[in-house]
Image (spheres, helix red, strand yellow):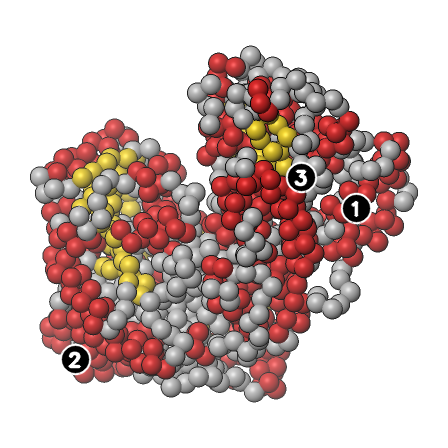
């Protein structure tokens, strides 16, 4: 069993190769350790460190790169988004990465129903370009927001609509390719020349064997497409689809487009379990739907555990196994009628059902299915599950029987798996709790894979139904095909690539399925003694670095929050996936050296905004903000830290001092921050010179409240009871009017609002800069201060989303054994959560209708708190709200202030937020509860943003500052 992972090219030879490539190629050439580490894994179990990474700008660059590699006799591996699950996108080779430059839709021909594309174009980009013509590309894997057409051609990708529109091979017209030896060829049905002629001869010679041995199965994606070589069906383009980069490099493709119904609807069918759901797919197919997807109750349970804020599962009908049946129509009514017909027909088979026509509700339901691959890799207790036997397919009429027998194979090997998949095509996706950390566990893994292969072949199926063979299944192909076909595969490969330099060891003469397993060959070498609790990873930082499986949701261009720095730079190093790969390699020390002192990891994490978007948006819950905090704590232990850690990291301490100064001295400080002393002060504090220093309030909210006599409404007379307002540093010292309005609203609802007797802090600024010891002390002191309220069950109300989220989530990572921390999850509430309890009452109190608002959700609120309560409150206040799907504002606490971060910070804001605000009508309020968001908007020169408390106070006719004093008992 191999355990070294790769056989590295000698350093001097690699340097010569890199120099020659850099001289020949106009695109990027990266042979540094960081890039080799980031490209060492795809979304599979396998790890092979590449020689280097080349990003060609055009076909001429590809030709030049191949010529240099040929001269140096090194292998080549073309890749797409590297979301492959079978291991075909990793190898000890020169990687050709097409995403950076060769990523365009070249032409749409609506009359012919075709598109001409470069290999690096993302599927959603093609679909967006085709949509105005009423067309789409039929195959649509769940990774449609980041997978590339080149990768789909390499894997013969399918997706959920294969029932209607087939696989990639069924939608490929022609391919422009280059062989390793530099031969140019346009592959299609009429191709001529040496390579096509030799392959025609191969197809003619093996025609009988091919017809008798290759399963006629809609989801057969295992082996080469020799059936596209036989007389009467010869098509060289279709023969190349699914070759997994082992034959030639695609430089351009012409693909078929299909008519896309203008409207879609979903009939969601509930069955007692997934077996029964599978038993009924043939009946559903009779209705000619666009999609028949299935999932097990385990997937729904996993989603609810991964994302407690997710509400889409509440729309599922009763059952323990479900089918998603999508229908189309010219109008929404027509699509819904078709879905209703399916639901009605299936009721006679005992199915429960719901019909969903609303596009947003459908999108939420599809998220359950599309995030399955990631969600199932981790259980709530930190248990790990892996791909491997990921996507076998059998004839759909045998799918129910196959599932039952498959579960017996799992049980026989002591394994558990939760599944979902393309039930209408008999294709199963599953993640299994293999033990890939021990030799005995790996032996069990091999035994299972062999038994599972025999089972699927016995049912007339294919080892792969979508993701290809790669390393995971290529070794098992002789169990599916006779020797004559296996020899045919070898001859097919040799015609294209006689030097065996295109992705060698994949499909033909394959590596063993238990070689180069990522977690086994990458065992950690650093001491696993983290300062944070990492409770979801059983107290292990190195276990946390294994969370990322490479599904790549962080490398999308839009939607959700993660990963803002990647969207600004387009660099893999600035994606959640890239950073996770570097941390994994740092932990094992084989490619990324230096451990916690690694400059590569420090560089990658420098542009992490600690926005926590990945904690919610990543299907496996990678929490890069926590990993960055841990890295900074270890990296700077015993050293002099950057100036920004002492200035902005300790901001609550400095503001506490300022808050005790007379107002006239605060005025002087604010004036100095705008005067000639500002520039040297910023340099000293590590603040970018282009940033303004936010003005400090002349008197903090807590200080002004303490000076006033007690309000007439006392706790004993408050009809709604007591609340403790958490006076966070930012609201208290920068925007005290927000707290004043919040108190006015809460007291108007009948609450007695109280303040802590001394300053409290959530510790976030210290935690985000890796000053974890100080953060622990700060949080522990604050918890002691508010303990009387927590133990009495008095809700603690936060106004600043980052601080409120820190109390709910971060405190447990800092102080896992503190009994007070356990009270925070239920004891801490947002301002909106308190008001949402009175949603029925609020409309009767509104004296000035709320108008319209554009809402920027704080990243930490998105990750930890959600916005359901905020939406409820805004509706109750009569506010017509548009919640932006804009991602992080870019300021992100201290990030946007730090010297060197300004450009990325503003690029994040300019993606969606700032253009949306500029385009909004003058009477539209810009709501931003987060201080960072408000500051970014203010410094960008847009209109003055407001907090929900301010909008609520206006709607209820409560003037700012009219709330009166609060008690500080």
Indicate whether 872 appears above or below 419. Answer: above
Q: Nearer the viewer, mark 2 or mark 1?
A: 1
Quadrant hosting residue 75: bottom left
Q: Quadrant of the C terminus?
A: top right
Residue of label 2: 482
Q: What label sits on residue 654 in the rendered view?
A: 1
Q: Position of residue 37 (x, y in %)?
A: 54, 72
Which of 494/297 is in front?
297
Indicate whether 667 appears above or below 59. Answer: above
Q: Position of residue 641 (x, y in %)?
A: 75, 62
The reply, left or right, for residue 838 in relation to residue 468 is right
- In whole angstroms, how far apart are the C-alphas of marks 3 and 2? 70 Å
Q: Residue at x 38, y 59 (%)?
A: 379
Residue of label 3: 728
Q: Earlier in the sequence, mark 2 or mark 1?
A: 2
Quadrant hosting residue 587: bottom right
Which of 309/282 is in front?
309
């Amino acid at each position: 069993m191999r355990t070294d992972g790769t056989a590295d090219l000698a350093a001097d030879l690699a340097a010569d190769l890199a120099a020659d490539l850099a001289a020949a190629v106009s695109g990027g050439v990266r042979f540094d350790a960081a890039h080799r580490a980031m490209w060492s894994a795809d979304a599979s179990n396998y790890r092979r460190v590449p020689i280097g990474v080349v990003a060609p700008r055009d076909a001429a660059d590809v030709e030049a790169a191949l010529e240099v590699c040929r001269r140096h006799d090194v292998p080549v591996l073309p890749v797409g988004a590297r979301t492959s699950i079978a291991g075909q996108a990793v190898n000890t080779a020169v990687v050709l990465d097409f995403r950076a430059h060769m990523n365009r839709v070249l032409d749409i021909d609506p009359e012919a129903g075709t598109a001409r594309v470069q290999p690096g174009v993302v599927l959603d980009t093609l679909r967006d370009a085709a949509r105005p013509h009423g067309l789409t590309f039929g195959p649509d894997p769940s990774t449609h927001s980041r997978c590339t057409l080149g990768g789909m051609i390499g894997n013969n990708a399918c997706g959920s609509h294969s029932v209607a529109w087939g696989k990639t091979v069924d939608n490929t017209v022609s391919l422009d390719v280059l062989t390793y030896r530099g031969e140019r060829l346009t592959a299609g049905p009429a191709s001529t020349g040496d390579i096509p002629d030799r392959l025609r001869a191969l197809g003619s010679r093996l025609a009988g064997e091919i017809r008798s041995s290759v399963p006629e199965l809609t989801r057969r994606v295992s082996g080469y497409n020799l059936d596209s070589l036989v007389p009467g069906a010869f098509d060289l383009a279709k023969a190349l689809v699914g070759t997994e980069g082992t034959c030639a490099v695609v430089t351009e493709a012409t693909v078929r487009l299909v008519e896309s119904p203008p409207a879609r609807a979903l009939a969601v069918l509930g069955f007692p379990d997934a077996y029964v759901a599978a038993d009924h797919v043939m009946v559903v197919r009779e209705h000619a739907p666009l999609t028949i997807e299935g999932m097990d109750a385990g997937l729904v349970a996993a989603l609810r555990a991964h994302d407690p804020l997710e509400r889409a599962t509440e729309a599922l009908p009763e059952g323990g196994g479900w089918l998603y049946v999508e229908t189309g129509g010219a109008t929404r009514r027509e699509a819904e009628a078709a879905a209703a017909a399916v639901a009605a027909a299936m009721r006679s088979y005992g199915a429960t059902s719901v019909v969903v026509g609303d596009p947003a509700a459908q999108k939420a339901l599809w998220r359950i299915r599309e995030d399955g691959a990631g969600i199932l890799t981790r259980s709530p207790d930190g248990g790990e599950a892996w791909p491997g036997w990921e996507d076998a397919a059998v004839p759909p009429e045998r799918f129910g029987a196959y599932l039952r027998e498959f579960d017996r194979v799992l049980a026989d090997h002591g394994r558990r798996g939760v599944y979902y998949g393309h039930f209408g095509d008999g294709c199963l996706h599953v993640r299994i709790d293999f033990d890939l950390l021990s030799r005995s566990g790996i032996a069990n893994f091999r035994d299972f894979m062999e038994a599972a292969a025999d089972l699927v072949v016995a049912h007339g199926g294919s080892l792969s139904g979508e993701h290809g063979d790669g390393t995971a299944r290529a070794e098992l192909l002789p169990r599916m095909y006779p020797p004559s076909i296996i020899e045919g595969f070898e001859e097919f490969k040799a015609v294209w690539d006689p030097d065996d330099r295109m992705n060698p060891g994949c499909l033909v003469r394959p590596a063993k399925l238990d070689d180069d397993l990522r977690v086994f060959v990458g065992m950690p070498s650093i001491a696993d003694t983290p300062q944070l609790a990492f409770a979801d990873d059983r107290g292990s930082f190195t276990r946390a670095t294994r969370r990322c499986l490479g599904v790549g949701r962080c490398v999308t261009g839009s939607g959700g929050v993660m990963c803002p720095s990647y969207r600004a730079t387009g660099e893999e190093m600035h994606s959640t996936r890239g950073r996770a790969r570097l941390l994994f390699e740092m932990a094992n020390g084989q490619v990324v050296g230096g451990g916690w002192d690694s400059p590569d990891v420090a560089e990658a994490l420098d542009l992490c905004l600690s926005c926590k978007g990945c904690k919610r948006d990543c299907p496996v819950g990678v929490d890069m903000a926590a990993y960055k905090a841990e890295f900074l704590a270890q990296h700077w232990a015993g050293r002099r830290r950057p100036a920004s850690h002492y200035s902005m990291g300790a901001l609550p301490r400095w503001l506490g001092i300022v808050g005790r100064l007379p107002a006239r001295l605060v005025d002087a400080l604010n004036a100095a921050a705008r005067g000639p002393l500002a520039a040297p002060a910023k340099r000293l504090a590590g603040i970018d010179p282009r940033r303004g220093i936010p003005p400090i309030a002349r008197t903090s909210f807590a200080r002004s409240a303490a000076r006033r006599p007690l309000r007439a409404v006392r706790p004993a007379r408050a009809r709604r009871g007591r609340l403790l307002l958490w006076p966070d540093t930012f609201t208290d010292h920068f925007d005290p009017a927000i707290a004043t309005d919040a108190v006015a609203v809460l007291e108007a609802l009948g609450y007695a609002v109280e303040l802590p007797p001394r300053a409290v802090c959530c510790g976030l600024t210290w935690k985000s800069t890796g000053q974890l010891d100080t953060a622990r002390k700060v949080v522990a002191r604050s918890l002691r201060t508010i303990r009387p309220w927590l133990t009495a069950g008095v809700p603690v109300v936060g106004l600043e989303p980052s601080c409120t989220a820190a109390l709910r989530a971060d405190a447990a990572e800092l102080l896992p054994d503190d009994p007070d921390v356990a009270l925070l999850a239920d004891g801490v509430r947002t301002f909106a959560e308190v008001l949402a309890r009175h949603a029925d009452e609020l409309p009767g109190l509104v004296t000035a209708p709320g108008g319209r608002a554009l809402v920027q959700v704080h990243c930490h609120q998105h990750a930890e708190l959600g916005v359901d309560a905020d939406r409820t409150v805004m509706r109750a206040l009569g506010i017509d709200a548009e919640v932006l799907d804009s991602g992080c504002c870019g300021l992100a606490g201290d990030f946007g202030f730090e010297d060197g971060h300004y450009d990325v910070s503003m690029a994040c804001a300019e993606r969606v937020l700032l253009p949306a605000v500029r385009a909004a009508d003058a009477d539209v309020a810009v709501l931003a509860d987060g201080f960072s968001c408000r500051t970014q908007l203010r410094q960008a020169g847009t209109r003055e943003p407001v907090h929900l408390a301010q909008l609520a106070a206006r709607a209820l006719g409560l003037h700012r500052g009219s709330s009166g004093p609060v008690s500080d008992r």
